[in-house]
Image (tube, helix red, strand yellow):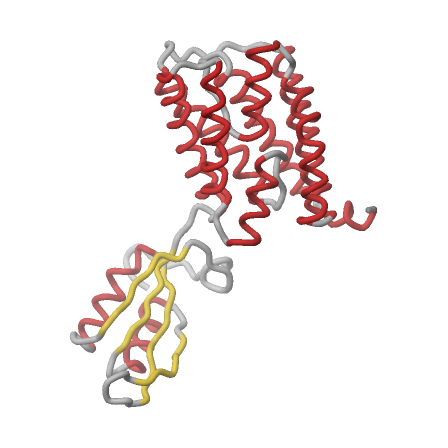
Amino acid sequence: MTSSLKQIKALNLLAYTVGCAFYALSLIYVNIPNRLAEGGVTGVTLIFRALFSIDPAITNILFNLPILVIGYLKLGKRQIISTLYCILMLSFWLWLFQRYPITINLNHDPLISALLAGLLIGLGLGLVFRFGATTGGSDVIARIIEQKFGVTMGKSLFAIDAIVLAMSLIYLDLTQMMYTLIMSFVSANVINFIQDGGYSAREFLIFSKYPTEIAERIMSELERGSTYISIEGGYKKTATKAVYVVVDPSEVRQVKEIINEIDAKAFVSIRVVTEQVGEGFTFLRKKRSIFGR
């Protein structure tokens, strides 16, 4: 257990603390005053608050204990310790914010409330997920689904939330539920945005008679390294090579122009890449002058 604790860095703990603060802030200052529900275990705690006036800071811990046992078996010690920390921090912030009520004036606009809640919840959970933890409840289940089936946590949470939100109709009307769904959609997309690092690149797979010329031009003009992939034509069975390169979205037009100049008949596949590591993306690149090289 001690070694698992040592693996959790101070930066991670800071991210968990800030993330849980954003999440709790939305629940106490935006969701509850504007009658917006929430999914997962947190949504269940809001149901119990509405029906029985039970403090969500307490039910958050009680409801998460059995789920933590399941998570311990599936996710391992380190993630469970992180999750336990997040559960305690979330309950702490929920308790603290209830003791210091603040009114956020949104002019009673349900759409603005839903958008703000989605943004805050997405920021909070996105930070927690980005650094390898969860806030317990359905987050643990979503993390297991992500590891086992490759489904992003944002999508899994949205599906799980829908079930809990349907239960929330016990104390909400249909209009409030529709705004809650908007909130959930926004938060799911913010979570995915933060998990992907807020950055997407473009992947080129280029099939041409002149792969070397294209790769060299891309390297000389954009300073992007490329990879040759050995291929065989399906019709003529001719052995050749394709060019694989990943570039910044702002460089897509230049790559297209290079390809078109060298081989207008080249077949090109372009895809969005949500995460890249290595030189040119995670390290500083040589800055270019506004007026040229």
Residue 209 in percent (x, y) is at: 24, 83
Q: Quadrant of the C terminus?
A: bottom left
Residue 161 in percent (x, y) is at: 48, 32
From this view, report whether residue 44 is shown above or below residue 287: above
- Please, which residue is most extreme toward the right here? 2
Residue 233 in percent (x, y) is at: 28, 84
Q: Is residue 236 left or right of residue 92?
A: left
Q: Residue at x 73, y 41 (%)?
A: 81
Towards the viewer: 196 or 231:
231
Q: Residue at x 40, y 21 (%)?
A: 177
Q: Is residue 173 left or right of residue 132?
A: left
Towards the viewer: 147 or 256:
147
Q: Is residue 99 left or right of residue 102?
A: right
Q: Residue at x 48, y 31 (%)?
A: 163
From this view, report whether residue 199 is shown above or below residue 268: above
From this view, report whether residue 3 is shown above or below residue 167: below
- Where, by quadrant of the figure, is residue 28 drawn? top right
Residue 52 in percent (x, y) is at: 61, 10
Q: Residue at x 48, y 50 (%)?
A: 151
Q: Disc count in the image?
A: 0
- Where, by quadrant of the figure, is residue 141 drawn? top right
Towards the viewer: 35 or 111:
35
- Where, by quadrant of the figure, is residue 64 drawn? top right
